[in-house]
């Protein structure tokens, strides 16, 4: 707040310190603020010049600050892709939603230095958003068959819930998560209710995503193999 006050009206906390204030990144180093007109940096305060639109700024905990999407947009110019992915994931976990989207900012600022990284992150996150349930099941069965593991029942009912895959003798349930069917608030609540009920009844629910099957099929195979073996050891 002292840094914002030091540069007067219209100044907002931005970049890494804004991300830290939103609790989506860890920031060390000088405080950073954004101002509309060129101003000199001071010891401990780094100044950025940008004319931010009203939907790119807000107040959080009493401090004028860039919105979460604008903060992520600024961070894209200075963070490696993996760190930006983590920041975006944190924002999602904390439910820091905003009407302003990164897509709109890409259109608004086509020459922004971080655009390439943002597009790469968004493309990666959206992978599998339109994959159907049957396509997820086919991917999973392909991994199971390639590993010569016993085939599970598909779309079976356990404790009143329809599950994607189940090995009844091992009491193992696998849910195949696609973003289109599991990203809504209703799905969020339903999925966790299912997991809770199954665990209380002695089942082991495990969630596997499209991206995990696409990018790390061997890790998925290895984990399923270990889970099935654990069911044998425990007498399930």
Image: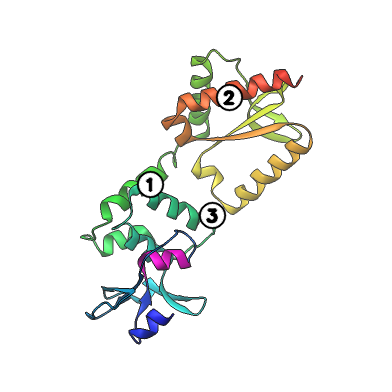
Q: Residue at point 70% right, 45% down?
A: 193
Identity of the residue furthest to the front in this view? 43
Q: Residue at point 71% right, 18% down?
A: 232
Which of the pair 166/156 is nearer the observer?
166
Which label sits on residue 224? 2
Q: Earlier in the sequence, mark 2 or mark 3?
A: 3
- Span highlighted in magenta in the image: 14-21
Q: Position of residue 14 (x, y in %)?
A: 37, 70
**Cα distance between the residues tagged 2 and 1:** 26 Å
Q: Is residue 81 above or below residue 165?
A: below
Which label sits on residue 82? 1
Nearer the observer: mark 2 or 1; the answer is: 1
Nearer the observer: mark 1 or 3; the answer is: 1
Residue matched to label 3: 93
Q: Is residue 195 above or below residue 54?
A: above
Q: Position of residue 220 (x, y in %)?
A: 51, 27
Q: Are marks 2 and 1 in contact (CB under 8 Å)?
A: no
Q: Earlier in the sequence, mark 2 or mark 1?
A: 1
Residue 100 visible (yes or no): no
Left or right: where 136 falls relative to 113 = right
Q: Name the secondary structure under disc 3.
A: helix
**Cα distance between the residues tagged 2 and 3:** 26 Å
Q: What predominant SS class does the magenta segment belong to?
A: helix
The C terminus lies in which quarter of the figure?
top right
């Amino acid at each position: 707040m002292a840094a914002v006050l030091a540069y007067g009206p219209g100044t907002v906390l931005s970049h890494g310190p804004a991300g830290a204030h939103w609790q989506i990144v860890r920031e060390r180093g000088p405080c950073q603020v954004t101002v509309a007109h060129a101003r000199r940096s001071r010891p401990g305060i780094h100044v950025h010049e940008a004319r931010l639109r009203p939907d790119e700024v807000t107040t959080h905990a009493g401090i004028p600050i860039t919105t979460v999407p604008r903060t992520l947009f600024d961070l894209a110019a200075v963070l490696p892709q993996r760190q930006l992915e983590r920041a975006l994931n944190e924002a999602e976990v904390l439910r820091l939603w905003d009407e302003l989207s990164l897509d709109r900012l890409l259109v608004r600022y086509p020459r922004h230095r971080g655009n390439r990284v943002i597009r790469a992150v968004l493309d990666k996150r959206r992978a599998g958003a339109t994959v159907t349930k049957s396509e997820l099941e086919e991917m999973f069965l392909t991994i199971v068959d390639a590993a010569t593991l016993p085939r599970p029942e598909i779309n079976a009912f356990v404790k009143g819930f329809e599950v994607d895959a189940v090995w009844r003798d091992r009491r193992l349930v696998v849910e195949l998560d696609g973003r289109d069917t599991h990203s809504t608030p209703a799905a969020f609540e339903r999925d966790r209710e299912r997991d809770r009920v199954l665990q209380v009844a002695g089942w082991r629910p495990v969630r596997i995503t499209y991206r995990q099957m696409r990018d790390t099929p061997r890790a998925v195979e290895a984990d399923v193999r270990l889970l099935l073996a654990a069911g044998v050891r425990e007498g399930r």
